[in-house]
Image (cartoon, rainbow, N blue to C red):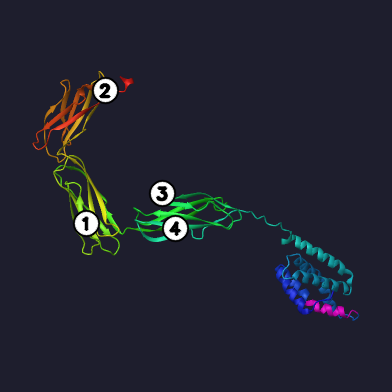
């Protein structure tokens, strides 16, 4: 086997240095430097060696085994640009030089030991490792898991399509899609995605009645072992172009002659002004007036009560019309509980049937305005009934009814209470008879 040129050997040497462990490079480099001198000694075998050349030869013989072992180790690594064949040739050349040099008694054994060392180094290195086990699995991927819709009017819906891909090796199964609240709806184009395929998840978020920052999530559950739940997000800000606050009025408990006023503000969030063109009420017990700011971006609707008010629950509706194209009309609900100057409780007296067991009942009569009064008369429907009037510390009276027959005798009857207030009508409280269940009679 011819020995390669010095340039070729240097090229191979550089490639070998890239393959072997760094701590062995100095030894290989030292043996490589001595190589030309040994070649010259081999070409002139009959020429007596000088003491210097003899030292060179011995040093080379000491390093030769390491050189072959290192290159042999590189030989057992995966091929790299044809280097495996080049290394084989170079090892043969070095082995041939070792056998042909003078005093060759020990060199054959050194070569054998070097090759054994090379195999050992390969076995201890990466060549003896078992191949890695690759587990096949689906892999769910969404390039943009968060969609920011910016600012949108609160009367609209946000729609977006998320693209889900399967970058795994097995089919991806979408098992469940769970929005975080009822305002979000999501639907898949398909639930099974083959490797390399994709599906579309269509989502819709309703912004109606919402204001400010919004963040809604959609959880996608699949058979991806590394990511069983993928969380997608819809986020942004809901703004109201026109805001009505409050959208209903409750005046609470008021008397028949009360005049109470509430204000509803209509604020324009955009730069466009709005004008109230008409207002109306569905009851004569409510009055409506309006006022607006000079720039037309704020309007106030003043809603008040108009006495005399009927006793009981007062319910009304105020209709407001504007020149805004998106909000041409809006309604404000108005309610109140109207009582007289003198109030009482309960409004009816219930009697459960119980033969032979007379009952007692209590009535509270008081003034809503704190006006002083007296109970002048109590009329009971049956002669057997009794009553007792007692004042209470908070003002007003307790009327205790006694010896009420728990029979049908009270059905259709009522009790009447009169006061010394001239403008207050009599208090009339009916009885309500409740028959007992058959098994209890």
Numbered badge on residue 353: 2
Q: Report the Cα–Cα distance between label 2 and label 4.
A: 65 Å
Image coords of residue 437 (percent x, y): 31, 23
Question: Is tag 2's residue or tag 3's residue first in the polypeptide sequence?
Answer: 3
The answer to which of 295 and 190 lies nearer the viewer is 190
Extreme top residue here? 356
Q: Please report the residue visible at 54 percent of the width from the left and 53 percent of the height from the top.
A: 227
Q: Report the Cα–Cα distance between label 2 and label 3.
A: 49 Å
Asked if residue 102 lies in the magenta stretch, the reply is no
Q: Which mark lies nearer to you, 4 or 3?
A: 4
Asked if residue 41 lies in the magenta stretch, the reply is yes
Residue 125 visible in the displayed image: no
Question: Is tag 3's residue or tag 1's residue first in the polypeptide sequence?
Answer: 3
Question: Is tag 2's residue or tag 4's residue first in the polypeptide sequence?
Answer: 4
Quadrant of the image occupied by residue 74: bottom right
Extent of the magenta region: 33-45
Judging by the rendered image, the residue that carries numbered circle 4 is 160
Question: Is tag 4's residue or tag 1's residue first in the polypeptide sequence?
Answer: 4
Image coords of residue 73 (percent x, y): 76, 66
Quadrant of the image occupied by residue 359: top left
Above-or-below relation of 313 to 53: above
Looking at the image, residue 420 sits to the left or right of residue 137; the answer is: left
Marks 2 & 3, CB-CB < 8 Å contact? no
Numbered badge on residue 300: 1
């Amino acid at each position: 086997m011819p020995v390669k040129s010095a340039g070729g050997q240097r090229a191979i040497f550089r490639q070998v240095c890239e393959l072997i462990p760094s701590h062995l490079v100095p030894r290989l480099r030292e043996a490589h430097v001595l190589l030309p001198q040994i070649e010259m000694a081999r070409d002139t075998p009959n020429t007596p060696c000088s003491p210097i050349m003899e030292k060179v030869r011995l040093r080379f013989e000491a390093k030769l085994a390491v050189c072959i072992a290192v290159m042999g180790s590189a030989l057992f690594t995966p091929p790299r640009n044809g280097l495996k064949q080049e290394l084989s040739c170079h090892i043969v050349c070095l082995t041939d030089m070792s056998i042909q040099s003078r005093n060759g008694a020990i060199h054959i054994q050194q070569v054998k030991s070097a090759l054994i060392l090379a195999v050992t180094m390969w076995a201890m290195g990466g060549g003896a490792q078992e191949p890695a086990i690759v587990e096949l699995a689906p892999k769910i991927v969404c390039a943009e898991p968060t969609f920011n819709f910016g600012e949108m009017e609160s009367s609209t819906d946000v729609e977006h399509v998320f693209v889900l891909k399967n970058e795994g090796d097995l089919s991806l199964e979408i098992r469940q899609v769970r929005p975080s609240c009822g305002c979000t709806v999501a639907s898949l184009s398909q639930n099974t995605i083959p490797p390399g395929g994709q599906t579309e998840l269509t989502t819709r978020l309703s912004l109606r009645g919402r204001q400010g920052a919004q963040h809604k999530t959609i959880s996608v559950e699949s058979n991806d072992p590394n990511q069983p739940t993928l969380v997608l997000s819809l986020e942004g800000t809901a703004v109201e172009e026109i805001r009505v606050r409050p959208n209903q009025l409750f005046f609470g408990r008021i008397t028949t002659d009360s005049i109470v006023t509430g204000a509803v503000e209509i604020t324009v969030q955009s730069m466009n002004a709005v004008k109230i063109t008409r207002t109306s009420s569905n009851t004569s017990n409510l009055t409506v007036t309006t006022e607006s700011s000079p720039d037309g971006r704020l309007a106030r609707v003043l809603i008040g009560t108009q006495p005399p008010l009927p006793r009981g629950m007062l319910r009304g509706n105020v209709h407001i019309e504007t020149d805004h194209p998106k909000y041409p009309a809006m309604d404000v609900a108005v309610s109140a509980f109207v009582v007289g100057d003198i109030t009482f409780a309960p409004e009816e007296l219930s009697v459960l049937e119980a033969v032979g067991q007379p009952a007692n009942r209590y009535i509270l009569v008081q003034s809503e305005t704190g006006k002083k009064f007296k109970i002048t008369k109590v009329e009971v429907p049956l002669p057997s009934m009794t009553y007792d009037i007692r004042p209470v510390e908070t003002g007003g009276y307790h009327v205790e009814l006694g010896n009420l027959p728990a029979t049908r005798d009270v059905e259709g009857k009522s009790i009447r209470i009169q006061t010394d207030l001239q403008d207050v009508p009599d208090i009339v409280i009916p009885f309500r008879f409740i028959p007992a269940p058959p098994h209890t009679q």
